[in-house]
Image: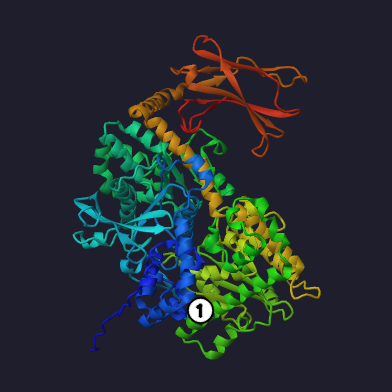
Amino acid sequence: MHPATFTLEARPILPASLQRLEELANNLLYSWDHSVRHIFYRLDLPLWQQVGHNPKVFLRRISQDKLDQAAQDRTYLADLNRVLSSFDAYMASEPDPEVSAALKSEQDLVAYFCAEFGFHESFPIYSGGLGILAGDHCKAASDLGVPFVAVGLLYQQGYFIQQIDAQGHQIALYHSLNSDELPVAPILKDDGAPLCIALPFPGRELVVQVWEAYAGHTRLLLLDAAVTGNQPEDQAITQQLYGGDQETRIQQELVLGIGGTRALRALGYQPTAWHINEGHAAFLILERCRELVEQGQDFATALELVAAGTLFTTHTPVEAGHDKFPLPLVKKYLESFAQSLGITFESLFELGICNGGDQFNMTRLGLKGSRFHNGVSRIHGGIASEMEREVWPQLRPEDNPMDYITNGVHVPTFLAPEWGQLFDIQAPGWRSALRDPNYWQFVDAIPDYQYWSTHKALKQQMFDFVQRRLQRQNRRNGASESINERMCQALDCPEQDILVIGFARRFATYKRATLLFADLDRLERLVNDSERPILIIFAGKAHPKDKPGQQLIQVIHDLALRPGFMGRLLLLEDYDQAMARRLLAGVDVWLNTPEYPKEASGTSGEKAGMNGALNLSVLDGWWGEGFDGQNGWGIVPRGLKHDQEFRNREEARDLLDALEYQVIPLYYDRTGKDYSKGWIQRSKAAMRTILPRFNAQRMVMDYVNKFYCPASAQQRLLLADNARRGQQLARWKDHVRQHWQGVHLRLPAPLPSRCQHGEPFEVTVEAQLHGLSADDVRVECLFQQGNGDKSTHQQVVDLKPGDQQGDWVPFSASFTPPFAGLQHLQIRIYPWHPDLAHPFELGLMRWVLD
């Protein structure tokens, strides 16, 4: 038997002059304001690192002596007052004028739902890209002053902590989170009791508690099922992010969508735009419909009203990334809910499927319950249009309502403070010009030696960080000191300027982490060139259930131990935001080799690029828009017509060719200097072009202008006058769907195949409307220049109705052809109503056929 060990935490008392440190520790503004973090860690840097950069825990464990000394330190107090003044000014700031012009804080509100939020490593309720993106979205919304509230889940364990053992196996460790250690607080009712929300579950009621966190101006509501009185298995619903089985997953998504909506209502929120960030939260559509049915609306009207104010964002072109639940499981949890909607369970289930099937797809629910939809890059928008074409069955993918907004990253979070200090000297107004690409021409004027010195300082900081993490990892695994020294040899030679390539992201097979190793002999020769050496750093987690992803980690681990790669290939464990900030700011090249077109956006390359790193990446996701030929290197993906083996082989050859013949020679082309002028020129181009185009402020303003403002207006339009127009639109859609099967187009006479310049061109087509009126449809002539493919210019000409002749209504127009020379035309008819959010939202369209 072993003696018991008990834990005791002797907490200090904050001196009066330091009381507001508690306020700073409880606002996630610290996650992007370096000066706030600095005011903490300068008190005790080793402790700051020991507590995982968590200011709340830091204040509980710092010694009383150090706090008392700081309270008497005039320099520290002056710095603290400057930080507090900046904090107060930020919290009192007015919305950005562009935001105020689009959204009115007294009448508009955006509700943003997501299953994970990645603000900072001290608040681990995120797993990867989706969460980091959601955190950046909230931060930028705060910076801009968007009327905004976010909704998520408070996990008891969050995502896992990764260890890689001596054999290269990933070990997933879970650490229970204590709310007392997080920047959260329970929301209390007027009587002082915690605010709790009840949800109907099969045979029982689930109660969830509502917590709040603040990220600057942005309020984040978090739901927690670990409530006394819930069954033990129900208390575990919010235990782990993406943990458990399918039943746990649907339970979490019911809590997020239905419980999140009820939490907003309990706090008096009336959002005008509802943003479903990926399908996990799509059940909010059903809850909002239930509210309207309870108020007397029929379900069709309720769905129309809900969809009018809803935006759905899809983040993955990988089919496995879309949550699907089997019919029996959905019936178990939603059969009684269908009754509260006034519909059959079969009708409810139809909302999650297309053309039959027994799997309820949350993406389909999100699309059918919204009128605004987007992918997260230009390429992904096109792919999503193809993937979801069944939602709009008669439309060509390029015509359906799927749009895109390319992801961006939060500059204050991911731009190294050293760059910010340099910008302060060169262009003091840069923080107010994040959305102005022309302003960033100043980067080219930064003296090369100053630019390179900043990069070298950041690179050395990265080396120090990597060495600490690698040594800790090796010693835990029992590696000998000689192995440790060999692995760290490139990190411990500050006089040696070595080209560093970074690859850090989730280990999923489509990301092809091992593409670089397709020709090991060639790579070994390149990394060990004594005149032009290379260091390659890998990091990332695989999902605990993703065995192929974990196998990739093991392959890289084994390669890193081979004599030819030891010290030239490093694999770091437990990739998190702290590591990301070091790697992104310190590497020379950021590598990304996804299987096209499976990278929806990717944002790590944006973060690296704004810090001057050069992307070497497959032209997929954001890089398909960001690459201009001068700001990095692009690997052109082979067409999908080729098999995967051929594509991997050819793209791997392109990658190694780019490294050997372009990247390495440019980096080491010193010509008498201690830096490469050509490299710096390309690095500046990366920073100058990427930072203003791919930042989160630009992204959020795109959402404001393209979606939040129109969705708010559309919802107000349909809700006005006791939802009269919403009811009319729902009835009109039902009428159209009942009659559309009989709608047809025909040409009464062949169209002329040529005309002279200046002569009018006349088009007449006849439509059989099958009970619809001419006012219910639009008939258009679509002209395309050249070969008539998707890439050519097109122009649309409206055809006007004439007097009905029997069962047919003529539509005609006389006009000058829009293009000179060869052009192609097609004629289409589709339902039209002035209150539609998108002209093709019904997904119904007929064409004149051959």
Question: Foreground residue, 35 or 337?
Answer: 35
Q: x%, y% of residue 766?
A: 56, 16
Residue 1 sits in which quadrant?
A: bottom left
**Residue type at numbered disc 1:** Arg
The residue positioned 57% from the left and 63% from the top of the image is 415
Residue 47 x/y as whole percent: 42, 79
Quadrant of residue 521 within the rendered picture: bottom right
The residue lying furthest to the right in this view is 671
In the image shown, does 347 or 337 lie closer to the viewer?
Answer: 337
Q: Position of residue 162 (x, y in %)?
A: 44, 72
| 157 lies above or below 832 | below
- Locate the C terminus and report the quarter of the image it occupies: top right
User: Is residue 621 at least partly visible in the picture?
Assistant: no
Tell which of 224 and 782 is nearer to you: 224
In this view, 162 is above or below 690: below
Q: Circle 1 sits in a helix, a strand or a loop, which is it?
A: helix
Q: Residue at x 77, y 71 (%)?
A: 669
Q: Residue placed at 65% from the left, 29% from the top?
A: 795
Q: Judge by depth and name the residue closer to the eye, 106 or 112.
A: 106
Q: Is residue 518 left or right of residue 710?
A: right
Label 1 sits on residue: 469
Q: Would residue 795 appear left or right of 202 to someone viewing this image?
A: right
Q: Position of residue 309 (x, y in %)?
A: 41, 38
Q: Quadrant of residue 536?
A: bottom right
The crowding category of the residue bearing disc 1, from other C-alpha atoms within 10 Å (few below 14, some 14 to 19, many at least 20), is some
- Residue 27 in view: yes
Number of numbered tags placed on the structure image:
1
